[in-house]
Amino acid sequence: MSSSRDDSGRFTRFGIFTLMASTRNTLRLIVTVLVVGAVIGSGVAAKEVIAILNAAREPSPTLFNYGLAPAIVSAPEAWTNDSCKECHAQIFEQWSTSRHAKAADNDHFEVELLDPGNRQQYCLNCHAPRTPGEALFPTQEPAELDSLFTSRPEWLRAGVDCLTCHVRDGKILATQMTDEAAVAHPLLHAPELGRAEFCSGCHQFALKSLYFPDNFRGHFQQASLDEFIHFRSEGNDVSTCHECHMDDGDHRMSGGYSNELLKSAVDLRLDLHWDPQEKLVEIDVTVEGGYVGHRIPGGEWFRFVSVVTTLEDANGRVLTASPNEVLQQRLAASGKTYVMQWPRREKMRRSAGDFEMGKMDADPRPDTRLFPEESRVYRYATTIDPGRAGQPVRARAVLLYHLMGASKAKRFHHLPRDVMSIVHEAEETIDLQDAARSSEK
């Protein structure tokens, strides 16, 4: 397994994330575990245990620490998101329509956080970073969770807001220092706001262990920074996440919920042919990744892309073919799939198995997502019933983006249309009779 060292002294292992970044940190964690064990054994309150664990943490240089704790902004009482609007009206309007603004105050998050398997503090630490949960383990259930979405406090409604990213210790964090801004409020130069590592404070993390709640285990649940580092290592010149997700400083920060951005991230082509010698209809479906700084799709492991291809006659009836093992084997040797039943569905996704959950002696699950600028072709072929050989046939392909799979959506009572969007569609028709005449000339 390859590893690399970043400029903060932490190690990043591709696919495995750990906070034990150096010998110093490893020793610190060992001492911490021993102390915590002794403290728990002596019956000292959990709050004191948390204080010991907090002391063992390596401070994050990028303002967020992967969901282990909320953001402590220490903003003066008069500083609110509305007060930011007075001078930054355009940015405020952009943010207010963003997914960040609704990160915690939306139906999906409410349903999933209240689910018996998800009632943990670390979800709030990233979705509503100003949550008053600094005294909680990341895996602990937030106090009065069931009433939280009834009372809807301001910090929940604000989600990931102006204060979350731009205020620490009563100062405004900024990448550009101006005299006008310095007169308006205290400033602190924070170049980390413009770096990819800043985004990874919430968009790169692993699962949390119930037994070691101050640490991570297993595979990345989101691996945005690792994937971006790999993208840069291939010689690409994009230097930050902001170049795609904050074009011209746009604080909408579009991502997987933006069909416009999805369309630019992946393309779809469909080619339909008639092979007169073999009497076969051949369909090539090409999915091509764009110039994107991460795998496609990025984000949570349960997001995926699928391509659904079908073949119909002129009346819209789905075609079928008879079994033919000899033809199936011959086509497979040339990289084609013999299809008897349509539609045909292909998925580009990663899955979470025992290895990804932290069991190191298990086999990793495959990751079939697209790489940036990768072109993948699905090649199908099928026979046509002689009675329909003179009729037109139509091939259709649809590229879909899924926020989650059908079983997960059903578990959380989400409607299919709420967790799936059509990104691209392609269609081709061929008249087999005309194609046959052309082949005879």
Image (spheres, rainbow, N blue to C red):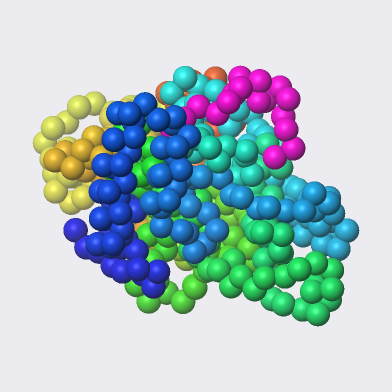
Instruction: Say whether residue 329 is magenta.
Output: no
Residue at 40% over, 44% down = 53
Name the image quarter holding the N terminus. Answer: bottom left
Q: Nearer the viewer, residue 245 or 82?
A: 82
Horizontal side of 68 relative to 245 (left or right) equals left
Instruction: Say whether residue 144 is magenta.
Output: yes
Residue at 14% over, 48% down = 333
Query: Where residue 240 appears, x then y in whole percent?
Result: 52, 69
Q: Nearer the viewer, residue 278 or 437?
A: 278
Q: Nearer the viewer, residue 71 or 410?
A: 71
Q: Is residue 86 depicted above or below 49 in this figure?
A: below
Q: Is residue 209 visible?
A: no
Specify the quadrant of the image occupied by residue 405: top left
Query: Where residue 322 appears, x then y in whole percent?
Result: 24, 26
Query: Where residue 158 appears, x then y in whole percent?
Result: 71, 42
Specify the quadrant of the image occupied by residue 350: top left
Q: Residue furthest bottom?
A: 179
The range drawn in magenta is 139-155
Q: Is residue 317 depicted above or below 19 in this figure?
A: above
Residue at 62% over, 53% down = 254
Residue at 71% over, 63% down = 171
Query: Where residue 412 appears, x then y in whole percent?
Result: 52, 22
Q: Residue furthest right?
A: 86
Horizontal side of 418 relative to 284 (left or right) equals right
